Amino acid sequence: MQAMRSADRADERPVTVYTKPDCVQCDATKRALHKYEIPFIEMNLSDNMDVLDRLKAAGWMRAPIVETADGQMWSGFRPDKIRDLASPKASRAPGAEWSRSSLPRSLPVRL
């Protein structure tokens, strides 16, 4: 794993971004996390086959896969989810629940 940013505040904990090489959505996700100064750790799935197998077995089929410190996950470039991470009050709003089951499965970047 490679640390991409350190936490600016003690209450911030990193997010993990599982990526693939030459992935436009992965790059956009990392840029947005940097923009909102959200600390994250990047894990390249092509270098971590065990992690790739675990994520596939869990049903994740596109990169990037983002996992927050509290276990919430999504895949693909989701600027709305990233904005929610940047604004803790917004992420606690009604209807802000994140669920893997609500995400589309047919996507261009395959794991």
Image (spheres, rainbow, N blue to C red):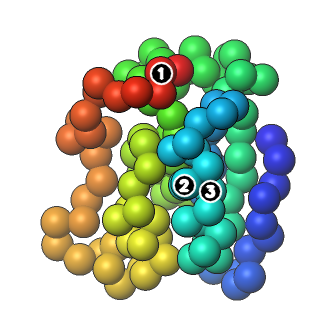
Instruction: Write the residue at 34% across / 73% down.
Output: 91
Q: Which residue is mark 3?
A: 30
Residue 44 rendering spot, x and y as whole percentages: 72, 33
Instruction: Write the residue at 81% across / 55% down.
Output: 3
Give the numbered dot on residue 29: 2
Left or right, 13 with respect to 102, comes to right
Query: Vertical placement of 105 versus 68: above or below?
Result: above
CB atoms of marks 2 and 3 within 8 Å: yes
Left or right, 66 with respect to 74, comes to right
Instruction: Write the residue at 74% across / 82% down.
Output: 8
Residue 61 rendering spot, x and y as whole percentages: 42, 24
Element assignment for label 1: loop
Q: Which residue is mark 1?
A: 110
Residue 26 rendering spot, x and y as whole percentages: 57, 44
Type of the residue with mark 2: Thr
- The first of marks 1 and 3 along the sequence is 3
Tell me the quarter of the picture where residue 40 sits. Answer: bottom right
Q: Could you say which is closer to the camera, residue 101 or residue 34?
A: 34
